Amino acid sequence: MQDMAKLLMLIGMLLFLFGALWYVIGRLPGDIVIKKGHTTFYFPIMTSIVISLVLSLIVYIVNRFR
């Protein structure tokens, strides 16, 4: 049971960090925004790259100290 609790806490912490990072970063230069009339298309390419790098670093650190 303790392993499941640790896993759930880790997942919760990663979700919190992901949400906080998304809030802080917001729209970076390099994100694609297309506005036509009443429609807006937002493709967060740079934000996705930054989040991917941060999550990769977190997974690397967690696996290294396991």
Image (cartoon, rainbow, N blue to C red):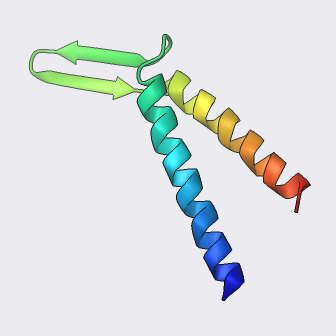
Residue 41: percent from the left, percent from the top? 28, 25
In the image, farthest residue toward the bottom: 1
Q: How far from the left and from the top, in percent, is residue 28?
A: 47, 16
- Badge count: 0
Compared to 10, does 7 lie above or below?
A: below
Which residue is at the front of the view, 30 or 9? 9
Q: Nearer the viewer, residue 11 or 46?
A: 11
Tell which residue pokes out farthest to the left in this image. Answer: 38
**The N terminus: image quadrant:** bottom right
Residue in view at x 45 percent, y 42 percent: 19
For image coordinates 22% across by 23% down, the residue present is 40
Q: Quadrant of residue 36?
A: top left
Residue 33 against residue 66 in the figure, above or below: above
Examine the rendered structure and indicate whether residue 16 appears above or below residue 5: above
Q: Nearer the viewer, residue 40 or 29?
A: 29
* Residue at (22, 15) in percent of width and height: 35
Left or right: 37 in relation to 18:
left
From the viewer's perspective, tell me whether residue 11 is left or right of residue 42: right
Give how far across and how far down residue 59 sits, in percent: 75, 50
